[in-house]
Image (tube, rainbow, N blue to C red):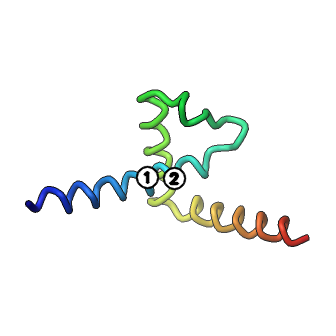
């Protein structure tokens, strides 16, 4: 029965990596979710992994989030 929590954690981690990788990709280069194939999914996961392992990418995420918040207010 230990496999269910492990699968749940692995799937959650993969979703976090996918979300980060998708957010880091420029919007004009993003494919629709229905158009993603295996290689595009793996590239997105790799981009998310690279974002977690480097400081510069995380700073870019926070900078983009603050710029979006300021844009919505003003």
Position in image of residue 55 (x %, y %) = 54, 65
Sequence-wise first label, 1 or 2 = 2
Label 2: how many Cα within 10 Å (few below 14, some 14–19, many 20+): some
Any mark on residue 19, and which? 2
Residue at position x 43%, y 52% from top? 49
Q: Is residue 40 above or below residue 74?
A: above
Q: Answer with the quarter of the image where residue 31 lies.
A: top right
Q: Residue furthest left?
A: 1
Secondary structure of the residue carrying numbered label 1 = helix
Q: Quadrant of residue 45?
A: top left
Q: Residues within 10 Å of mark 1 (few under 14, many from 20)?
A: some
Q: Nearer the viewer, residue 60 or 16?
A: 16
Q: Residue 15 location in percent, x, y?
A: 42, 53
User: Please, is residue 34 above or below residue 15 in the view?
Assistant: above
To which residue does mark 1 refer?
49
Q: Residue at x 63, y 62 (%)?
A: 61
Could you tell me which secondary element the residue under label 2 belongs to?
helix
Give the number of the mark in front: 1 or 2: 2
């Amino acid at each position: 029965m230990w496999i269910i929590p492990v699968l749940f954690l692995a799937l959650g981690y993969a979703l976090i990596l996918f979300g980060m990788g998708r957010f880091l990709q420029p919007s004009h280069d993003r494919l629709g979710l229905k158009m993603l194939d295996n290689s595009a999914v793996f590239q997105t996961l790799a981009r998310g992994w690279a974002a977690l392992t480097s400081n510069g990418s995380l700073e870019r995420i926070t900078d983009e989030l603050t710029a979006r918040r300021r844009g919505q207010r003003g």
